[in-house]
Amino acid sequence: MTTKDMKDIVALCKRRGFVFPASDIYGGINGFWDYGPLGVELKNNLRDLWWKAMVTCPPIGPDGAPVEIVGLDSSIIQNPKAWEASGHVGGFSDPMMDCKETKLRYRADHLVAYLWKKSEPGKEKFVAFHQEAEEEEKSRRLKKIGFSTDLAEYQKYDFNDPAILGNLANVLGPDAREFGTLTEPKQFNLMFHTFVGATAGEDNKAYLRPETAQGIFLNFKNVLDSSRVKMPFGIAQIGKAFRNEVTPRNFIFRSREFEQMEMEWFCKGEDAKKWQDFWFKERVKFWKSLGLSDENLQIRNHDQDELSHYAKAGLGTADIEYKFPFTAPDFGELEGIAHRCDFDLTQHQKHSGTKLEYLDQTTNERYIPHVIEPAAGLTRGVLALICEAYTPDPGRPSGVYLNFTPSMAPKKAAILPLTAKEEHVPTATKLYLALREEFAVDLDVKQNIGKRYARQDEIGTPYCFTIDNDTASDGSITVRERNTMAQERIALDKAGDFLREKMKG
RNA sequence: GCGGGUGUAGCUUAGUGGUAAAGCACCAGCCUUCCAAGCUGGCUAUGAGGGUUCGAUUCCCUUCACCCGCUCCA
């Protein structure tokens, strides 16, 4: 059993046209990737199936009736006030400081500094600690550097205090031995800025959305007023989102421009638990149906301290995680199912002055609904599918094949005339033209048949149809199956039925 | 952003202060009745910028990208 190596996967993605570095000919740009001819097919397949599972054919709810979900495609740029209301302008930038001595980096708002009250004026020395450090730990460290160990004799400062920021030379970093090794806090703006209109200035500053969800909340009232939806219901959206990640890493796993598939499920607060459990199960089922294996999937509940600002008061967030080659033996987030409470709608109601309540006309009850949000990374899903499918196999000419399910495979079948001779090519072309009306298929005429099979293995095409001399005499073709390399003969005019049947799986 | 590493063709590797080499892949043609076969021909590279030098892929500086670790991931 050969292991999956991320280097090989990235190389295959580039070689066969799944994923390219963005701006490759200029040396790339950190955190951005382009999807090639096969990558976009794969991404579209996943996107379309998600849309089908959410909007076109949503699941049967816990009470036996189909649930109601409508679609939306909101703008990437919205009024900047929306991001103030959502908490992203205030909460989406973290001041960071580095320690020149220890090379460690800290979030300034996670540190505190202690000043000995009896310090002579002008000779103040501050000692910094991690916010969550135990008192005993603090005393021990103070003793070590020859300071009083009685914490009551100290005044505590936050790192946004000018008394600290103006005096960094006299601050001892949390892990440092010398004073004055901490750098000025630097703001990391996780939201991309842009300017709306021809002139750039503070007045027309805008943001690229860091999540698609807010577009849904902003349109809650519009959808309610135009769609005859009744509680509980969902609004689903797929689209790009942008985050100025400090460190983009791991191929397309953490990139600065990525694509999300989010559904906001609006329900009564008292029903939130029921719906979170429901959606969680549905979403796990979805990923498994695409071929992600049990052993590579895990579910994980967020700890209280890692919950988002909007989820702290609620039922928390449960993640569906995938064991990527670069996280193994650990897992990386694929989708989060969060209880966002009534945080967002309440915030937007407050900031916009527009009522965002739901009126239940049967009970005459008005309330701001709670939200359960299954939010999945489309591009992360693509990566998981590629990693799952990647199967080294030294026993075949290509040495590797991609084991996509037929529904996810970028090409469903390849039509191959056995030779480039006249008697094979016209029949193959005719079959290709018929099948492409319904399926993404390839016609490949050139080079020997082995090379063509090998190529299709590498891009994960599940079936190859080969036209040979027998096709002319008995109307049969060869079907070659990707995983087993086994061949069987079927009737030429049954090729469409064959694929249609396989696509159901 | 810090520390370490890497950077020659699509891939794997060679080499040199003086014309950059090969295998595989790819493309074309021939051949070929089922798994990268064979023959002929062809395309393609020193990540980018600057410096030293008569001349730099080689030496120096800067930068960019990728990998590993730290940090971060509302």
Image (spheres, rainbow, N blue to C red):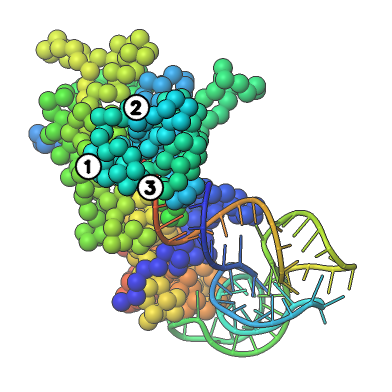
Could you give the CA–CA distance between mark 2 and mark 1, rounded to whole angstroms?
Answer: 19 Å
**Residue A74's x, y, as percent?**
42, 28
From the image, tell me which residue sits under label 2. A117
Residue A504 pos. (x, y %): 27, 55
Q: Is residue A223 above or below residue A492?
A: above
Could one spot residue A329 in this view of the protein?
yes
Q: Quadrant of residue A55?
A: top left
Q: Reading the chain from its start, which is encountered first: label 3 or label 1?
A: 1
SS class, disc 2: loop
User: In which quadrant of the rendered view does residue A56 lie?
Assistant: top left
Closest to the camera, between mark 2 and mark 1, is 2
- Identify the amino acid type marked 1: Glu
Mark 3 residue crowding within 10 angstroms, few (<14) / some (14–19) / many (20+): some
Is A1 displayed left or right of A123 in the figure? left
Chain on which label 3 sits: A
Residue at the disc numbered 1: A136
Give the amino acid type for the residue marked by disc 2 in the picture: Lys
Residue at image x 47%, y 79%?
A450
Residue A453 occupies quadrant: bottom left
**Same chain, labels 2 and 1:** yes
Could you tell me if the residues under marks 2 and 1 are in contact, i.e. CB atoms within 8 Å? no
Image point (21%, 48%), residue name: A300
Q: Quadrant of the C terminus of chain A?
A: bottom left
Q: Which mark is residue A210?
A: none
Q: Note whether residue A226 is visible.
A: no
Q: Tell which tag, 3 or 1, sits nearer the viewer.
A: 1
Secondary structure type for disc 1 = helix
Query: Could you classify mark 1 by the number of other residues whose Cα lies within 10 Å: few (under 14), some (14-19), or many (20 or more)?
Result: few
Chain for numbered disc 1? A
Q: Which residue is mark 3?
A: A175
Nearer to us in this view, A155 or A28: A155
